[in-house]
Image (tube, rainbow, N blue to C red):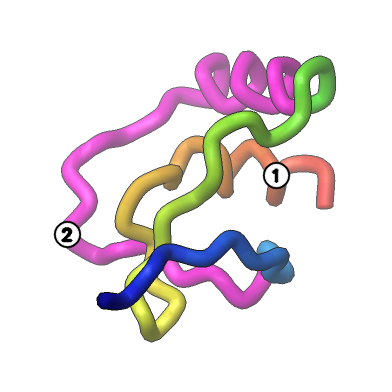
Amino acid sequence: MNHPQIEMKAVATLRPYAGNARTHSKKQVKQIAASIRRFGFTNPILLAGDGTIVAGHGRVMAARSWA
C-alpha cells in the first residue's frame, strides 16, 4: 500500500494543473494569504507524482504572492 507523505517543497517547483476549473480573484488570494500568515498551512497542497497541483491552487497562489 502506498501511504501519503507530507513533504516540504519550494513553491516555485509546484505546477498548476492546466485543467483546473476553479479561479481565484485577487481578493480571495489576499484573504487566503492572510489566513496562512495567521494560522499557517493547516491543509496541505495535494500533488501528483510529477509535482502537478491536484488541490490547493489558491493556497499556492497566496504563497507565491509573498514569496
Q: Residue at x 42, y 64 (%)?
A: 4
Find numbered disc 2 in the image and state the secondary structure of the residue it sits on: loop
Q: Is residue 58 magenta?
A: no
Of the pair 4 and 58, the residue shown nearer to us: 4
Question: Which one is nearer the viewer's eye here, 35 or 49?
Answer: 49
Density class for disc 1 (Cα within 10 Å; few <14, some 14-19, many ≥20) is many
Q: Residue shown at 32%/76% (left/top)?
A: 2
Snapshot quadrant of residue 15: bottom left
Decide: marks 1, 2 in contact (CB < 8 A)?
A: no
For the point 64% across and 66% down, the residue is 7
Q: Give the percent coordinates (x, y) of residue 24.
A: 40, 29
Q: Which residue is mark 2?
A: 19
Pointer 1 residue: 63
Number of labelled discs? 2
What residue sits 31% from the left and 34% below the top?
23
N-term mark: 1 or 2: 2
What SS does tag 1 mark?
A: helix
Residue 23 in the magenta stretch? The answer is yes
- Looking at the picture, which amino acid does disc 2 mark? Gly
Is 15 drawn above or below residue 29 in the view shown?
below
Q: Which mark is residue 24?
A: none
Residue 55 position, x and y percent, is 35, 47
At label 2, counting other C-alpha atoms closer than 10 Å, the crowd grade (few under 14, some 14-19, many 20 or more) is few
The magenta stretch is 12-36
Q: Nearer the viewer, residue 5 or 58?
A: 5
For this view, does 1 lie left or right of residue 27? Answer: left
Where is residue 26 shown, x and y percent of the image?
Answer: 55, 25
Q: Amino acid at mark 1?
A: Ala
In three-dimensional space, the C-alpha distance between marks 1 and 2, rounded to whole angstroms, equals 21 Å
Report the front residue among 32 and 5.
5
